[in-house]
């Protein structure tokens, strides 16, 4: 693939720049993640939160989160502000349905991200009765690869069972997310056929970034050739049209922009996406390091924080340093995703450079 952006891509990216600038000024809250627990029933090698069965940090009481929701409710259109439960493993909490029902009563749509292990037919029925709109299941390859990365011998069979449940639900929006690693990469074509055979409608593909347990595990990182091969695979699959696949919102991809996902790259964290973490911290998304937190619901009003802070998220000029300082695609990338910065506010790696572009 040529290193140069096409004229069509440049025109689209220039338009995207203007849209993002306007969105940052307006900062209309569209998505709110709730890290409702750090407890988990697995010990995933790539976990960004280093979650455990019994977390040292207790679950946030439901009433505390709902109070934060009530802080923003007068200022947003609930029908267009999506609440997503994440963890840890969200289904470790027995009161998810209670919180979901309270959100439903406030007219907020809500969903969750789960490893699927606890998603029984009965639990799915109760979640939907509480107003759940969407759900994402993590499935990181075939049984050997999935169980290896999840470090749980039965994780694949339970995740597959969860997927088979969802296929039957016509009124639920759902997808599969896959974290590609060196063990699963050689099997992407076969895994795609497997997902199609199951009836999976939507598929998001991630590559693993160096955070949490993944920070020092070389077995999880794709080499540059495999990274490019993953993007080529996604582009081919999109052209086939049998499953709607997108690469994650991880970084600017140069000539691959809008070839491997439906939209041009932009980091939405702090622009229209926020998170409430398990300790009450207010951030852009749950994958971003704690030094970028903007406040805490236990001492700040969530809406006030959203309105008056998040400067570093909305104006990325501070990130134009190091390799980014003289980068010719800075105007389109603006320093990649916020989750790729370390505790010293330095970029950990650049997708554009990984692809061999400079």
Image (tube, grey):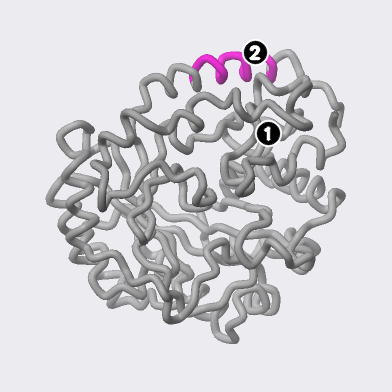
Q: Residue at x 84, y 54 (%)?
A: 223
Q: Residue furthest bottom?
A: 153
Q: Which mark is residue 252?
A: 1
Q: Quadrant of residue 301?
A: top left
Residue visible at 38% across and 74% down?
119
| Residue 105 relative to residue 245: left or right | left
Asked if the residues shown at circle 2 and circle 1 are in contact, with their CB atoms under 8 angstroms apart, the answer is: no
Return the x and y of residue 130 as percentages of the image width and height. 20, 61
Rendering coords of residue 330 (x, y %):
70, 23
Q: Dot 2: what SS?
A: helix
Q: Residue at x 40, y 70 (%)?
A: 165
Question: Looking at the image, can residue 195 be seen?
Answer: yes
User: Farthest residue in the left direction?
Assistant: 105
Q: CA distance from mark 2 to mark 1?
A: 16 Å
Q: Which residues are magenta?
A: 9-19
Q: Left or right: 72 with respect to 91?
A: left
Up-down: is 145 above or below 136?
below
Crowding at mark 2 (Cα within 10 Å: few <14, some 14-19, many 20+): few
Q: Nearer the viewer, residue 139 or 74?
A: 74
Closer to us: 349 or 267? 349
Magenta: main secondary structure equals: helix
Q: Which label's residue is closer to the chain start, 2 or 1?
A: 2
> Which residue carries the number 2 mark?
11
Residue 67: x percent and y percent? 17, 51
């Amino acid at each position: 693939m040529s290193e140069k952006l096409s004229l069509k891509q440049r025109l689209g990216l220039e338009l995207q720049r203007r849209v993002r600038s306007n969105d940052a000024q307006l900062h209309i809250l569209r998505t709110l993640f709730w890290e409702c627990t750090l407890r988990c029933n697995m010990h995933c090698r790539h976990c960004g939160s280093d979650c455990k069965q019994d977390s040292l940090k207790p679950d946030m009481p439901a009433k505390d989160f709902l109070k934060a929701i009530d802080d923003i409710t007068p200022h947003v259109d609930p029908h267009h502000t999506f609440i997503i439960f994440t963890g840890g493993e969200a289904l470790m909490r027995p009161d998810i349905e209670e919180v979901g029902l309270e959100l439903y009563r406030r007219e907020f749509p809500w969903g969750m991200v789960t490893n699927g292990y606890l998603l029984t037919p009965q639990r799915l029925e109760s979640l939907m009765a509480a107003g759940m709109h969407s759900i994402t299941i993590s499935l990181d390859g075939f049984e050997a690869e999935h169980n290896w990365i999840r470090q749980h011998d039965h994780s694949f069979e339970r995740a597959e069972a969860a997927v088979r449940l969802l296929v039957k639900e016509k009124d639920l929006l759902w997808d599969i997310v896959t974290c590609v690693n060196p063990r699963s990469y050689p099997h992407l074509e076969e895994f795609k056929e497997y997902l199609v055979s199951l009836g999976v409608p939507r598929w998001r593909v991630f590559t693993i970034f160096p955070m949490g347990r993944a920070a020092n595990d070389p077995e999880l990182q794709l080499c540059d050739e495999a990274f490019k091969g993953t993007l080529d695979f996604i582009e081919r699959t999109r052209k086939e049209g049998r499953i709607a696949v997108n690469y994650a919102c991880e970084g600017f991809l140069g000539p691959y922009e809008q070839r491997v996902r439906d939209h041009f790259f932009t980091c939405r964290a702090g622009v229209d996406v926020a998170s409430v973490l398990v300790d009450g911290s207010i951030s852009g998304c749950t994958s971003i390091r704690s030094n970028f937190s903007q406040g805490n619901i236990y001492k700040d009003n969530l809406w006030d924080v959203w309105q008056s802070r998040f400067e570093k998220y909305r104006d990325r000029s501070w990130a134009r340093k190091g390799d980014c300082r003289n980068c010719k695609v800075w105007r389109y990338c603006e320093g990649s995703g916020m989750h790729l910065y370390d505790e010293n506010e330095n970029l950990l790696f650049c997708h554009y450079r990984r692809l061999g572009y400079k």
